[in-house]
Image (spheres, rainbow, N blue to C red):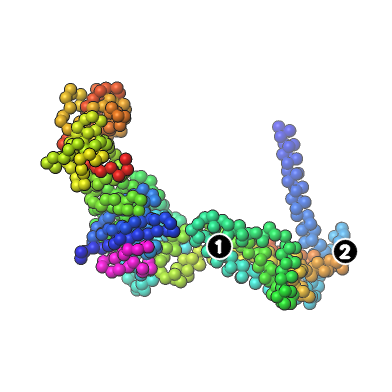
């Protein structure tokens, strides 16, 4: 009996250790974004919102935040629409092996190292004579996001009953009417969920952004620059803001996905 | 033909190199219940989808009440289809599902209300208008699908194996209901199924399909009693096929040599002396006799190999000299005293067998 209890204790401790290992860095960052001490040191002397204030007062940080949000919005909308259209088209293909091959091809960029994509894009845009900036970066983000959008859309469309679309046509709806009345309302949660995921991926994308954004800043690029000059506690504040945003997006994305399945 | 509801004329359909339908002709009369019956892959669903407008024939024509609809999209055809798995719209409740086609037709609110109520009453789901499709049982969902398809008052209702997902009891009940609804509405129904019992129970006429062709069209009785070929006799119900060579044809009677026994049967067109042919006899038409003499031309000798209790009858199998098993369905008292290994005579009435020209020996 005691032996059993002891082994349960050990198992519990192990789980706790793993969870600590996973979350400690994040917790530390969140914690220090609220502490008065400008240096990362223990014990905590007092709590403050000063770092958030100074972060949001800094024009560099504000413009980086704006850029990041613009990139996230473009990624969400563009990847959502393109991914949904692509997946929907795939599902209508009659030959299963062609569909499999196309899904595989569309997922490949997710395996290609970001460094390779980042550099190739930079070279490619230079050849085209496009100056580095937000547009190039947005195109890069789309490449990163699309495979994930296609993947989630595919998983959710697997259960989509296409005979519903035929039923609507049969009952007198034109193809446009069918899309508005049936297709769109039914896939909307999945598309929005996938778009939120795209936004989350775009928000913390660093490698491709760094190679293509030029002299502009996104939040990850800015933070990286600030880190090189020593640890500024407002970085903790920015990181915490970003974290909150990302967690929120991923949770919303998952909730929307779940609702569709039930 | 003035009262033809659906005319399918020389319809062919190929998907790439695969031919799904070969030169199909079929006319469905007004108010008629016609089943397309066949095994999976025989082309029956493709044919129905061509009538509904989801597929266009490679060649041939489809007319509905005289109008050529061959190239019309489904939304502009006077037909409605009940799908195999219902295909109800999950984001609309039962009422909105049924009202969908009526809203598209821009009916007034009052008229839609009345029609939906009428349809719900027809399928006996009066109180379920507010339910969502996920809250319905399989049988209820198929009833709603039927109500939705009928609400728009189609000239022809098409049904694509709508009961295949239901359990046997429910299916039997719905067969009778569907038949009653069809009679009450005096509507034309074209029903696709792979279930021969379903087709026999409901249909005015059955079109049996095999490998993209209609192999026989007729009333259930016609098809059961006078199958046109070996495929049909084998597909519909159980049958005994006694294969042999035609010895003579005289006065409308053909004589066949089957395992050394001469059997007689009413001849059919296309039979010639020396041809290979088969005699089809239903198990319920075969009697088992222990008498010494074999009645002239309508009996064979065999040894009982199996006795199977089926509840309402007893099925006795006897092996002939060439190894063919002939089955006889007997009543309890007829099977009394029979045992495996007995040498018996299998006999039948003169009108019982049908002569078939073998097409798949």
Rendered image quadrant of residue B284: top left
Residue B71 magenta-highlighted = yes
Residue where numbered disc 2 is placed: A39
Mark 1 or 2: the one toward you: 1
Q: Is residue B325 above or below residue B81?
A: above
The answer to whether residue A261 of the structure is visible from this angle is: no
The answer to whether residue B67 of the structure is visible from this angle is: yes
Q: Position of residue B89 (x, y in %)?
A: 44, 62
Q: Could you tell me which residue is drawn at 31 percent across and 64 percent down?
A: B62
Q: Could you tell me which residue is drawn at 74 percent across and 36 percent down?
A: A6
Q: Nearer the viewer, residue B204 or A188?
A: B204
Give the side of residue B221 with respect to residue B231, left or right.
left
Q: Could you tell me which residue is drawn at 16 percent across and 24 percent down?
A: B293
Residue A17 magenta-highlighted = no
The answer to the question of whether label 1 and label 2 lie on touching residues, with beta carbons closer than 8 A, is: no
Q: Residues within 10 Å of mark 1 (few under 14, many from 20)?
A: many
Rendered image: mark on residue B156: none
Q: Write the start and end of the magenta stretch as one range.
A: B57-74
Q: Nearer the viewer, residue B101 or B131?
A: B101
Q: Position of residue B272 (x, y in %)?
A: 20, 43
SS of the residue under disc 2? loop
Q: Earlier in the sequence, mark 1 or mark 2?
A: 2
Q: Residue furthest front?
A: B274
Q: How far apart in space, not on screen, are marks 1 and 2 (Cα)?
A: 49 Å
Residue where numbered disc 1 is placed: A87
């Amino acid at each position: 009996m005691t032996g059993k209890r002891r082994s349960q204790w050990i198992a519990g401790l192990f789980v706790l250790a793993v969870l600590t290992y996973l979350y400690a860095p994040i917790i530390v960052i969140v914690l220090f974004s609220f502490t008065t001490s400008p240096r990362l040191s223990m014990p905590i002397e007092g709590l403050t919102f000063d770092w958030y204030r100074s972060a949001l007062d800094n024009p560099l940080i504000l413009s980086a935040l704006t850029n990041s949000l613009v990139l996230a919005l473009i990624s969400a909308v563009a990847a959502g629409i393109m991914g949904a259209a692509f997946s929907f088209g795939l599902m209508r293909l009659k030959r299963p092996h062609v569909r499999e091959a196309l899904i595989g091809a569309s997922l490949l960029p997710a395996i290609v190292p970001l460094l390779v994509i980042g550099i190739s894009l930079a070279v490619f845009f230079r050849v085209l004579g496009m100056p580095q900036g937000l547009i190039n970066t947005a195109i890069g983000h789309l490449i990163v996001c699309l495979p994930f959008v296609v993947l989630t859309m595919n998983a959710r469309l697997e259960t989509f009953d296409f005979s519903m679309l035929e039923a609507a046509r049969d009952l007198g709806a034109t193809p446009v009417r069918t899309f508005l009345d049936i297709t769109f309302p039914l896939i909307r949660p999945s598309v929005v969920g996938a778009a939120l995921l795209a936004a989350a991926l775009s928000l913390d994308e660093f490698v491709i952004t760094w190679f293509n954004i030029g002299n502009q800043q996104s939040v990850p690029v800015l933070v990286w620059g600030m880190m090189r000059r020593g640890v500024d506690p407002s970085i903790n504040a920015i990181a915490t803001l970003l974290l909150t945003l990302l967690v929120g997006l991923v949770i919303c994305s998952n909730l929307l996905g779940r609702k569709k399945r039930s | 033909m003035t009262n033809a509801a659906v005319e399918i004329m020389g319809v062919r359909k190929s998907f790439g190199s695969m031919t799904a339908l070969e030169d199909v002709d079929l006319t469905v009369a007004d108010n008629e219940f016609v089943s397309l019956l066949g095994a999976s892959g025989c082309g029956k669903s493709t044919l129905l989808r061509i009538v509904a407008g989801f597929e266009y024939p490679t060649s041939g024509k489809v007319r509905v009440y005289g109008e050529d609809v061959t190239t019309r999209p489904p939304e502009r055809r006077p037909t409605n289809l009940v799908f195999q798995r219902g295909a109800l719209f999950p984001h609309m409740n039962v009422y909105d599902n049924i009202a969908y086609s009526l809203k598209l037709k821009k009916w007034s609110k009052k008229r839609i209300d009345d029609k939906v109520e009428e349809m719900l009453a027809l399928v006996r789901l009066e109180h379920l208008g507010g339910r969502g499709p996920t809250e319905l049982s399989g049988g209820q969902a198929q009833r709603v699908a039927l109500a939705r398809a009928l609400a728009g008052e189609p000239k022809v209702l098409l049904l694509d194996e709508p009961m295949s997902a239901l359990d046997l009891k429910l299916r039997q009940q719905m067969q009778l209901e569907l038949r009653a609804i069809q009679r009450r509405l005096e509507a034309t129904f074209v029903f696709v199924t792979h279930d021969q019992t379903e087709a026999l129970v409901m249909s005015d006429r059955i079109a049996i399909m095999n490998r993209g062709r209609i192999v026989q069209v007729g009333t259930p009785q016609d098809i059961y009693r006078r199958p046109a070929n070996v495929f049909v006799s084998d597909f519909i119900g159980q049958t005994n096929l006694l294969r042999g060579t035609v010895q003579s044809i005289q006065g409308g009677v053909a004589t066949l040599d089957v395992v050394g026994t001469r059997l007689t049967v009413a001849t059919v067109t296309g039979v010639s002396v020396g041809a290979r042919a088969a005699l089809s006899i239903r198990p319920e038409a075969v009697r088992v006799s222990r008498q010494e003499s074999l009645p002239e031309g309508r009996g064979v000798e065999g040894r009982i190999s199996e006795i199977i209790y089926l509840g309402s009858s007893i099925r006795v199998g006897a092996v002939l000299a060439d190894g063919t098993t002939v089955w006889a369905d007997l009543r309890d008292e007829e099977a009394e005293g029979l045992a495996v290994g007995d040498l018996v005579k299998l006999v039948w009435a003169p009108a019982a067998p049908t002569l078939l020209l073998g097409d798949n020996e």
